[in-house]
Image (cartoon, rainbow, N blue to C red):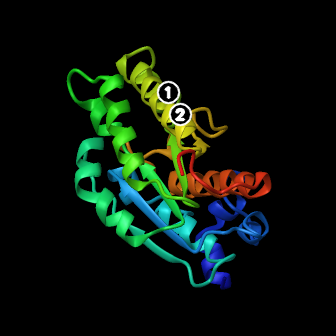
Amino acid sequence: MTHDTATSFAAEAADPHCLGEGESGRLLRGAPWASFAVVGDSLAEGVGDPLPGYRTASWADRVAEALRTAAPALSYANLGVRGLTAAQVRESQADRAAALAPDLVAVVCGGNDLLLPGFSPARLARELDLLFARLAAPGRTFVVFALADVTAAVPELRGGPLAQGVAALNAVMREAAAAYDAVVVPMYDHPAVADRDLYSADPVHASARGHAVIAAATVRALSGRIAAGGFSTGRA
């Protein structure tokens, strides 16, 4: 990193919730993954506002960069498209992702289902099971996310349907994760969850800082899986 680059991203370099210099290499030493695919909606795609002091790069791109510290030839594909429900992700991305035969698959969807009238956790659970079943393969690792509680940073949203909805969505995702032995990235109660600059202006999406923090949390969660050993899905 050049001096000018380090100065431009000084806030990120000093942020304890972001990855420090050389941290990816230490955390991912011994990682078995040589290919990485991402499926999902806008959160998978990497939508978000820039923020001074932070590099504008999506969490997924950052995770791919980190994985390349352990596997320089890592292949990476992000199929995420904004606006899709879980069913639409399955219909448009599952076969394409499976054809890539990735070792590691990040699944990020359900948020748009939550925003639709008549949201049904049971219906979402069925869709997620179909999606995971299509993607599951021996030796393949899933990574999923317990979405951040944005109401912690936006007081006017507290106590409303969004808070309950995100909690319900995360419960469904955790059930799917347990069934398929997925790595869960715990963003819901992350130490920075109440920081308003973690989110874009909307405030649905992560800001550039948010993407950096999510990437760090993902790498740290993957490091935990490496330390624990065992890289197959729950349904080989």
Q: Which of 52 and 22 is in front in this view?
A: 22
Would you identify the image quadrant in which residue 119 lies?
top left
Element on which disc 1 rests: helix
What residue is at 44 percent from the left and 14 percent from the top?
Answer: 159
Numbered circle sitting on residue 171: 1
Quadrant location, the N terminus: bottom right
Identity, as a three-letter code, of the amino acid under mark 2: Arg
Q: Nearer the viewer, residue 139 or 167?
A: 139
| 150 relative position to 42: left or right | right
Can you give x and y, in whole percent of width and height, for residue 97 in the image?
A: 36, 64
Identity, as a three-letter code, of the amino acid under mark 1: Ala
Query: Could you tell me if residue 196 is visible in this image?
Result: yes
Q: Which class describes the residues within 10 Å of circle 1: few (<14), some (14-19), or many (20+)?
A: some
**Which residue appears farthest toward the top when viewing the image?**
159
Q: How far apart are marks 1 and 2 (CA)?
A: 5 Å
Q: Which of 73 and 162 is in front in this view?
A: 73
- According to the picture, the residue beneath numbered tag 2 turns out to be 174
* Whether label 1 touches label 2, CB < 8 Å: yes
| 110 relative position to 193: left or right | left
**Count the marks: how many?**
2
